[in-house]
Image (tube, helix red, strand yellow):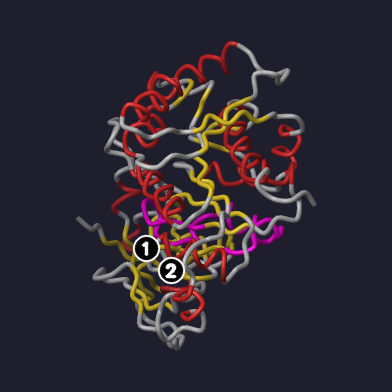
């Protein structure tokens, strides 16, 4: 179902790389609404322009940012950017877009990607929530401040990579070397057809030391174990494994979530890593010798063993529980120039959520030579 509404651009509410957020005066005196315009798809609507909006998600009060989406500028056709490739993303939707992909035979990086056979033991950190990204980077920087980091944006949630304000700020602060949009997602610095080719591009085109693979903002959940878009994390870890990387599974942990299924270790980590995962990975946990180790962390460790490592072992998969110290991690999390929030909770309100993502980043950095 699509709900269409028309309106006129009243003012600009803000912008970030590739995105404009606008205040729209709706037709027929229906009031105002905020809307997102992606420059790659519509160009930049100007004040006074009439636009066509898709308002189905915002009218249903869904958790997709609270904004309508600009579909078209009714009186203006945006400029066409010529590309050499023929890859299409958001395929067979009215907004399908052509991109130059690194694995496109017409692209400048094709021979590099085609010749690559693996990713040379590159650490690959995988998480199920986009909010983990800055925390993982903070963890990396506690050990290796000059590491080249590539972020692979998968297509399980927001398809436009530009939708993430966190990624935009991380790029502006030179904390990410490159963003690669994989699968049906689009709008990264580089485009790839699959997570596999994105990882090859991260290593051999970008020259990344570490790759981070996470879905974009706006995951889809149903309250069930399997009906969650973040289960895709298992597939990303499989890709890292078959390409000869060092796969690292970032645990989703919370000390403040009111939902029992997410308190301590989230059931989503149990499903993705304990049941869906078919390759051994590193699972970072807080070191028992760390001064911060307490009953909460012991409880998380027990949950990991009972719902991930033990069930995986019964299927012949031997995950490695990797102990990591958290010394200096809180300071590193606070220093990242991105506001830390996950499911509406800040670093101060739910430190464990970011701490475990940071431990995964520090684990990845431990595979690299010291600065």
Write the start and end of the magenta stretch as one range: 152-178
Query: Residue furthest toward the top?
Result: 295
Query: Residue furthest toward the front?
Result: 316
Identity of the residue drawn at 75% across and 56% down: 146
Q: Is residue 333 left or right of residue 260?
A: right
Query: Is the Cβ of the residue at disc 1 closer than 8 Å to that at disc 2?
Result: yes
Percent x, y of residue 128: 44, 42
Disc 2: which residue: 192
Check residue 84 in the rendering and tell me which mark sits there, or answer none: none
Identity of the residue drawn at 40% across and 27% down: 308
* Residue 324 vertical placement versus 338 (above, below): above
Percent x, y of residue 112: 51, 77
Q: Quadrant of the N terminus?
A: bottom left
Quick check: is 28 in the magenta stretch? no
Where on the picture, by quarter, is residue 89?
Answer: bottom left
* Residue 294 vertical placement versus 175 (above, below): above
Disc 1: which residue: 183
């Amino acid at each position: 179902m699509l709900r269409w509404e028309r309106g006129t651009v009243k003012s600009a509410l803000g912008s970030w790389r590739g995105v404009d957020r606008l205040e729209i005066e709706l037709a027929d005196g229906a009031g105002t609404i905020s809307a997102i315009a992606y420059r790659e798809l519509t160009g930049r609507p100007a004040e006074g322009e009439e636009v066509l909006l898709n308002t189905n998600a915002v009218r249903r009060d869904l958790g997709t940012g609270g904004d309508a989406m600009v579909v078209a500028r009714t009186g203006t056709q945006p400029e066409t950017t010529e590309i050499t490739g023929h890859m299409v993303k958001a395929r067979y939707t009215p907004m399908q877009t052509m991109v130059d992909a690194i694995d496109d035979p017409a692209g400048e990086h094709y021979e590099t990607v085609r010749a690559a056979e693996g990713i040379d033991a590159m650490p690959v950190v995988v998480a199920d929530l986009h909010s983990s990204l800055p925390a993982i980077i903070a963890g990396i920087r506690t050990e290796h401040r000059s590491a080249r980091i590539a972020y692979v944006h998968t297509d399980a949630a927001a398809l436009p990579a530009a939708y993430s304000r966190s990624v935009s700020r991380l790029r502006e602060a030179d904390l990410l070397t490159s963003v690669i949009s994989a699968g049906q997602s689009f709008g990264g610095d580089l485009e790839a057809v699959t997570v596999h080719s994105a990882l090859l591009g991260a290593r051999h085109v970008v020259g990344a030391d570490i790759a981070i693979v996470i879905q974009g903002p706006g995951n889809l959940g149903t309250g069930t174990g399997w009906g969650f878009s973040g289960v895709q994390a298992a597939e990303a870890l499989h890709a890292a494994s078959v390409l000869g990387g060092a796969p690292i599974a970032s645990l989703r942990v919370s000390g403040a979530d009111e939902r029992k299924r997410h308190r301590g270790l989230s059931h989503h980590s149990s499903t993705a890593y304990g049941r869906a995962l078919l390759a051994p990975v590193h699972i970072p946990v807080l070191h028992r010798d760390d001064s911060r180790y307490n009953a909460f962390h012991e409880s998380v460790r027990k949950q990991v063993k009972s719902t991930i490592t033990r069930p995986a072992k019964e299927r012949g998969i031997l995950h490695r529980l990797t102990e990591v110290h958290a010394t200096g991690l809180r300071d590193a999390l606070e220093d990242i120039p991105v506001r830390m929030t996950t499911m509406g909770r800040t670093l101060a309100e739910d430190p464990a959520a970011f701490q475990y993502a940071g431990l995964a980043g520090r684990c990845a950095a431990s595979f690299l030579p010291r600065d």
